[in-house]
Image (cartoon, helix red, strand yellow):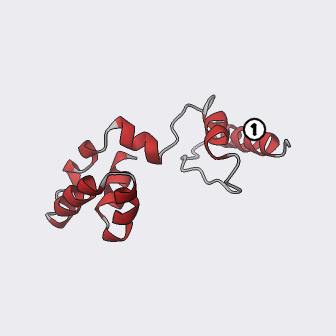
């Protein structure tokens, strides 16, 4: 996720969003690294505080609640980037979706 955030920060179209958060200098540094094709260096510029600004982080046991706490009043759809390699993984995802949907239905 650090690499993904770093990539977006390096993209000129997203600079305004980073500037709004006081991260314009970071976006400028990452843009220079990307132009120099120094992709492997970019993620190290995304500290925990920056990562948590853009990413909701949690375990399977905590992520549904964290997503609801953070976005429950404003988000109507959610997509997970979780690899599904087995029936057990599929069940975990079903459980997450069920937890989010059932809580989201509460007034």
Residue 15, image quadrant: bottom left
* Residue drawn at 73 percent across, 38 percent down: 95
Residue that label 1 marks: 99
Left or right relative to 32: residue 53: right
The answer to whether 15 is drawn above or below residue 50 in the figure is: below
The answer to whether 86 is drawn above or below residue 79 in the figure is: above
Residue 7, image quadrant: bottom left
The answer to whether 62 is drawn above or below residue 54 in the figure is: above
- Residue pushed farthest bottom? 13
Mark 1: secondary structure:
helix
Residue 36, image quadrant: bottom left
Q: Between residue 76 and residue 18, name the one nearer to us.
A: 18
Residue 56 position, x and y percent, is 52, 41
Q: Between residue 50 and residue 102, name the one nearer to us.
A: 50
Left or right relative to 27: residue 8: right
Q: Tell how many labels.
A: 1
Left or right relative to 99: residue 28: left
* Residue drawn at 72 percent across, 44 percent down: 97
Q: Between residue 11 and residue 3, name the one nearer to us.
A: 11
- Residue pushed farthest left? 36
* Residue drawn at 33 percent across, 58 percent down: 9
The answer to whether 49 is drawn above or below residue 30 in the figure is: above
For label 1, count other residues whose C-alpha is less than 10 Å away and answer few (under 14), some (14-19) or many (20+): some
The quarter of the picture where the C terminus appears is: top right
Residue 53 position, x and y percent, is 45, 44
Residue 71 position, x and y percent, is 64, 47
Residue 70 position, x and y percent, is 61, 42
* Residue drawn at 73 percent across, 42 percent down: 100
């Amino acid at each position: 996720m650090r690499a993904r955030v770093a990539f977006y920060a390096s993209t000129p179209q997203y600079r305004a969003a980073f500037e709004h958060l006081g991260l314009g200098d970071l976006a400028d540094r990452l843009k220079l690294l990307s132009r120099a094709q120094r992709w492997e260096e970019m993620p190290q510029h995304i500290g925990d505080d920056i990562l948590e600004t853009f990413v909701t982080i949690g375990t399977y046991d905590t992520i549904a609640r964290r997503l609801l706490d953070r976005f429950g009043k404003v988000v109507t759809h959610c997509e997970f980037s979780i690899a599904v390699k087995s029936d057990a993984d599929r069940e975990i995802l079903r459980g997450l979706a069920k937890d989010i949907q059932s809580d989201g239905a509460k007034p």
